[in-house]
Image: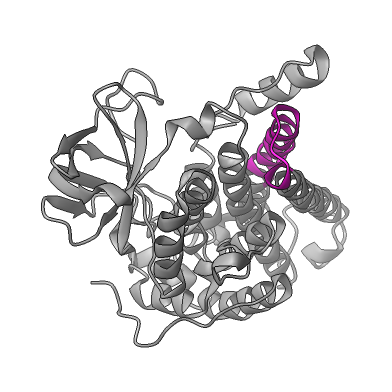
Amino acid sequence: MNAPLHNKPYLIRSDAEALEVAEHLAESFASEASQRDRERLLPHIELAQFSQSGLWGISVPKAYGGAGVSSVTVAKVIARISQADGSLGQIPQNHFYALEVLRINGTPEQQARLYADVLNGQRFGNALAELGTKTALDRNTRLERDGDKFRITGRKFYSTGALYAQRIPTLAVDEHGVGHLAFVPRNAAGLEIIDDWTGFGQRTTGSGSVVLSQVPVAADDVVPFQSAFERPTTVGPFAQLLHAAIDTGIARAAYEDTLKFVRSNARPWIDSGVDKASDDPLTLKAIGKLVTQLHATEALLEWAGEFVDAAQANPTAESVAQASIAVAEARAISTEASLNIASKLLELAGSRGTLAHHNLDRHWRNARTHTLHDPVRWKYHAVGNYYLNDTLPPRRGTI
C-alpha cells in the first residue's frame, strides 16, 4: 500500500531550494539504503517523504504554480537522490518524463489539471515498455474508442514506479497505429499492477508488470505521444539526461564508499612497504583515476543539462540535436563511470568487500542493471556520426 499524504506537499520555489531539499532528503534516505536493497524492503514510507518534500513538482512550470526549475537542477536532484539510494533515484524518472510529454503535447486544460494533481502530491509511474515485441519501439497495447472515452488493453513490463503511483501514464496505439500517452488513474477498473520485478540490481524500483484489461480512460486524460518525436522536441534528450543522472549518482555513491573502505587501515594487496592501503602508491593511482572520471561525468551531466535547457527554450532541429548529442556523451561516460568505480570498489576492498553485511556490491548491481536500459554503444555511434558526418541523431527516447 502507498503511504498516504496527510498534507499538501511543500511548495519549492527555486532551483537553489530544490537542491537544498534534495541534499537534506538524501542524507535521510542513505541511512537505510543498504538494508532496503539487501532485504528488498519497498520504500513506501520514503516515497511519502519524497512526495511531501515537494521535489516531485519542481518541473511544473511557474505559470501553473510550480518552480519551473531547469533541467540541470532536475538532473542534479536525481543524481543526489540516486547517490543515497539508486532505486529511489530512478523511481521518479518516468514521472518527470511524463510531465515533459505533458508540457510539450498537452492542452492548456490538461496541463492545468494534471500539474495541479502533481503539486497536490500525486506521483506518476509508467507503463511504456513491452516484452515480446519485434523491436523495442513496437507496441501491442491498444487504445480503442468507446463512446466519449477510451479503453486500453495490453500488458507492460519495466513499469518503474507504477507500484507506487497514483496515475500510470500508459503508452498505447490507436487504430491507425499512432501512439498516445494515457494518464490512467491507479484505481481504474481492469488495471492490475504486479510486483514481479526480480532484477539483481535496482531492486526496489517496482519495475514490474502492468496488465490492462479494457481499462476505461477519459478522453481528456489522453495526450498525443508519437508527435513529440515527429518534430523537434526535448522529450528524448530530457529522458536520457535523467538516466545519466541516475548513473552519475550511483558512481558518486560507489566512489564515496571506496574512500571510506580504503581509509579504514586496510593493508594493501601486495607488500609495497606501507602499512595502510591509503599510502599505497597503486591505490593512490587508482583513486586518482576514479575521481577524475567521476568529476568528468558530473561536469558532462551539467553541460548536457544546459543544452537541454537551451533546446526547451528554443526547440529547433539543430538545438534538439545538440541536446541529444550532449546527453548521449553524458550518458556514455556515466555508464562507464558507474560500472568502473563500482567494480574498482570491490577490487580495492578485496574479499571483505563481498561480505553480506557490507553490501558493497549493491553499487555494481545497481549500475549494471540500470545501464542496460539502452545500449551505450549506440550513444558513441550517434556522437561520432554527428561530429564526423554532420548527421543529426534520430528523434527517439533512447538517444
Q: Which residues are magenta?
A: 311-337
Q: Quadrant of residue 283?
A: bottom right
Magenta segment includes 215: no
Q: Residue at x 52, y 68 (%)?
A: 57
Q: Is residue 190 above or below residue 178?
A: below
Q: Residue at x 31, y 27 (%)?
A: 139
Residue 243 vs residue 367, the one in the foreground: 243
The furthest residue to the top: 389
Magenta segment includes 331: yes
Q: Residue at x 73, y 65 (%)?
A: 259
Residue 128 at least partly seen: no
Please name the predominant secondary structure of the magenta segment in the image: helix
Residue 399 vs residue 131, the one in the foreground: 399
Q: Is residue 307 above or below residue 37?
A: above
Q: Can you say which quadrant of the picture contains the C terminus?
A: top right
Horizontal placement of 41 versus 175: left or right? right
Q: Position of residue 240 (x, y in %)?
A: 59, 42
Q: Position of residue 154 (x, y in %)?
A: 19, 36
Q: Position of residue 364 (x, y in %)?
A: 55, 50
Residue 21 at least partly seen: yes
Q: Quadrant of residue 334?
A: top right
Residue 264 vs residue 368, the one in the foreground: 368
Q: Position of residue 311 (x, y in %)?
A: 71, 42
Horizontal placement of 385 versus 55: left or right? right
Q: Can you say which quadrant of the picture contains the N terminus?
A: bottom left
Q: Residue at x 61, y 23 (%)?
A: 378
Q: Quadrant of residue 152?
A: top left
